[in-house]
Amino acid sequence: MSPAASPGAPLSIGVLLPDVLGTYSDAGNATILAQRARWRGIPAEIISVTAAVAPPTTCDIYLLGGGEDTAQIFATEWLGRHPGLLTAVQTSSMLLAVCAGLQILGEAMSDRSGRVSAGLGLLDLTTTPGTRRSVGEVVTTSTLPGIGTLTGFENHMGLTTLGTGTVPLGYVTSGVGNGSADRSGRAGDGALTDRIIGTYMHGPVLARNPALADHLLERATGGHLEPLELPDQAALRRQYIDA
Ligand code: GLN
């Protein structure tokens, strides 16, 4: 678990600002992480960190979701008031950031009215408005070894340009993603560092891409996780949905 967490503590998953950045069920990423940990015998807890509370700085994994332009400005200011949290996601925790969550981690972002806002500066990227909204399925090949294809649903106006040293989470085979090529000349989606995974993929992205969920869990627990023997999906459907 995170070096900052107390020994024997459950894997802690902090959902940051679900009341502000909570579109498209992005908070469901926490459910996926917790359940995949529990299925392996790893106790896990989900901590909902609304704007009204002081955020804990010892979670193993933090999650940031998507939202509207005004919501993301609020979120940027709120996060900027909690430097301990920003230090944690750079030094001891993992962070998954989706869409607006990705944009606010960059250097700057502008909206259609031309207003430019400073980002949190955790990632070397900038976001500017495109000429039309990118809506639909996005498919990439991940830059993370062994992860393969990633899929998600995107809905954003902003297009993101990565700094020359910034690696995308994946290269786009269908859809838009960042909407710009990186230094290799290929169109990417999101951004990737040791501790931060950013993407334009909603879904929730971890429900649609369990290998990415397990990658986050492995990074957070520091250990290799065996593949899961999952319950038969057709049997579950018969039991819970078709009944
Ligand atoms: N407001 C941002 C945009 O439209 C982010 C949207 C989102 O998070 N889905 O670019």
Image: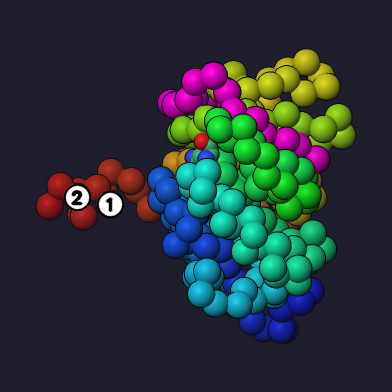
- In the picture of the structure, the residue carrying the numbered disc 2 is 241
Label placed on residue 236: 1
Residue 9 coordinates in the image, percent (x, y): 64, 81
The residue shown at (71%, 78%) is 5
Residue type beneath disc 1: Leu
Q: Position of residue 213 (x, y in %)?
A: 58, 50
- Mostly what secondary structure, the magenta segment? strand
Q: What is the span of residues highlighted in magenta in the rendered image?
A: 124-144
Position of residue 56 relative to residue 154, above or below, is: below
Query: Which residue occupies the extreme left position in the image?
Result: 243
Q: CA distance from mark 1 to mark 2?
A: 8 Å
> Which picture quadrant has residue 44?
bottom right
Residue in view at x 72 percent, y 84 percent: 7
Confirm whether the magenta stretch covers residue 21: no
Instruction: Choose the circle earlier in sequence order: 1 or 2.
Output: 1
Does the rendering let one see residue 227?
no
SS at circle 2: helix
Farthest residue in the top direction? 185
Q: Is residue 43 left or right of residue 8?
A: left
Name the residue type under label 2: Ile
